[in-house]
Every structure is written in C-alpha cells, then in structure tokens.
Image (spheres, rainbow, N blue to C red):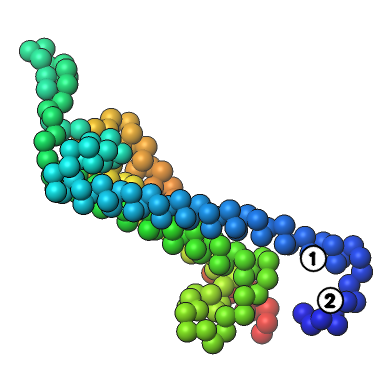
C-alpha cells in the first residue's frame, strides 16, 4: 500500500488498520521470553559441565531439574523406601540434560518463527529482500504457511518430551506414559489435518484462478 493510498483512508479504517501495532508489545514480550530461555540454556549447560568434572551441587541441581532417580531401594515387602545415592554423572543423566537443551533450542526456534513470521504477516513488512540472512521460509510466509510450520515445530518439541519420558520411564507411572503418547499422537493428527486443509485450500484457490 502506497503512502497516497494510506492518506485516502477514512478515520475509522485508518484506526482499524493502525490497530495492528497493538501486537508490537506482544512480540517484544516474546523476545524477552526468548532471553529467559537463553539464560536457562546456559545455566543448564554450565551445570552439566560442572557435574562432568565432579561438582556435586551441580549434579544435584541437574538430577532435580530432570526428575531423575537412581535404582530404588526396597524393603522385604517390596515397597520402595528410598533411592540409591547418585555419586557421579552417568550416561542417562547426560542424555536427559542434552535432550532438555535441545528442547530449549527447538522452543527458541518456535519463538523466532512466531516473532518474525507473525510480525511480517500481521503487523508490518520487514523489507528483508536481498538481505544475506533472510530466512528462506520468510520469502513466502503467510498465515497458512505459518500455521503448518508451527504445528511441525510443536510435534518436534513433543517428540523430545516423549523421548525424555521414555528414557526416564522408571520414574513415571504407566498412566503418565500412556497419556503423553496419546497427546503426542493427537499433535500428529492435528498437524496432518492442518497441512491437509492448507493443501485443499491452496488447490481450491488455484482452480478458481484458472
């Protein structure tokens, strides 16, 4: 829309069109949320490195954050009365922490897609054409493409959470495992439905054009 076209808008249409800028604080808030995730990532990474060098406080912090428990100690009746102490970091703890770091990265990627794609789609053009760092997907982003990409990202995040649960399955009930699997499958079907709907709408628009 050119400047001349904007000046031709009446007061009410101009107000309605300008109201899109009310979304700007929302995207700024997401940027701050991403900063929190960066801080969380580096905190967990420092704890992992310290635990690898035998720092017990860092190891205890990692174990608490991932909900990991060692082998259970049972009495004569088979009841759990405690857990064996964790003296040093093991492969399972490392794997769970790394998956947690990957989870943070994927959520950060999701935030970037929402911030950049949402701003470009619903607020204002960023005019990144020709910029060497322009994301490949941003050149053809629209509301439908953004929905599909967000659904795909959510499936990836859900997959990481499910894998973390399965690796640490001894510390979860069968009900928890079952419901996490069902929810993940629901995410899969939702993403397929969104992609199929977008495909049908795209074909319908193409047929109308012809």
Mark 2, residue position = 6
Q: Residue furthest top?
A: 77
Report the label total. Answer: 2
The residue at 34%/43% (across/down) is 181
- Numbered label attached to residue 17: 1
At 84% from the left edge and 76% from the top edge, which residue is drawn? Answer: 6
Q: 10 Å neighbourhood of mark 1: few (<14), some, or many (≥20)?
A: few
- Residue 195: in sight, yes or no? no
Residue 9 found in image quarter: bottom right
Q: In what quadrant of the picture does the N terminus appear?
A: bottom right
In terms of image quadrants, where is residue 56? top left
Q: Quadrant of the C terminus?
A: bottom right
Q: Are marks 2 and 1 in contact (CB under 8 Å)?
A: no
**Vertical comparison of 142 with 167: above or below:** below
Name the foreground residue: 142 vs 197: 142
Q: CA distance from mark 2 to mark 1?
A: 10 Å
Which numbered disc flags the more N-terminal residue, 2 or 1? 2
Say what secondary structure mark 1 lies in: helix
SS of the residue at dot 2? Answer: helix
Query: Is residue 142 depicted above or below 49 in this figure?
Result: below
Where is residue 100? Give x, y as percent: 31, 49
């Amino acid at each position: 829309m050119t400047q001349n076209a904007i000046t031709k808008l009446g007061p009410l249409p101009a107000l309605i069109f300008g109201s899109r800028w009310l979304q700007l604080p929302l995207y700024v808030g997401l940027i701050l949320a991403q900063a929190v995730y960066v801080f969380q990532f580096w905190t967990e990474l420092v704890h992992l490195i310290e635990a690898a060098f035998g720092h017990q406080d860092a190891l205890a912090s990692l174990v608490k954050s991932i909900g990991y428990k060692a082998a259970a100690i049972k009495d004569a009746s088979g009841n759990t009365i405690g857990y064996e102490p964790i003296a040093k970091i093991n492969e399972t703890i490392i794997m769970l922490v790394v998956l947690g770091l990957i989870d943070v990265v994927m959520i950060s990627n999701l935030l970037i897609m929402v911030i950049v794609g949402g701003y470009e789609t619903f607020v204002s053009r960023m005019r990144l054409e020709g910029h060497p760092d322009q994301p490949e997907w941003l050149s053809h982003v629209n509301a439908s493409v953004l929905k599909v990409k967000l659904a795909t990202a959510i499936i990836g995040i859900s997959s990481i959470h499910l894998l973390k649960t399965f690796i640490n399955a001894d510390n979860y009930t069968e009900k928890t495992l079952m419901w996490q699997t069902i929810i993940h499958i629901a995410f899969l079907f939702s993403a397929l439905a969104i992609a199929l709907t977008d495909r049908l709408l795209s074909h319908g628009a193409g047929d109308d054009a012809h």
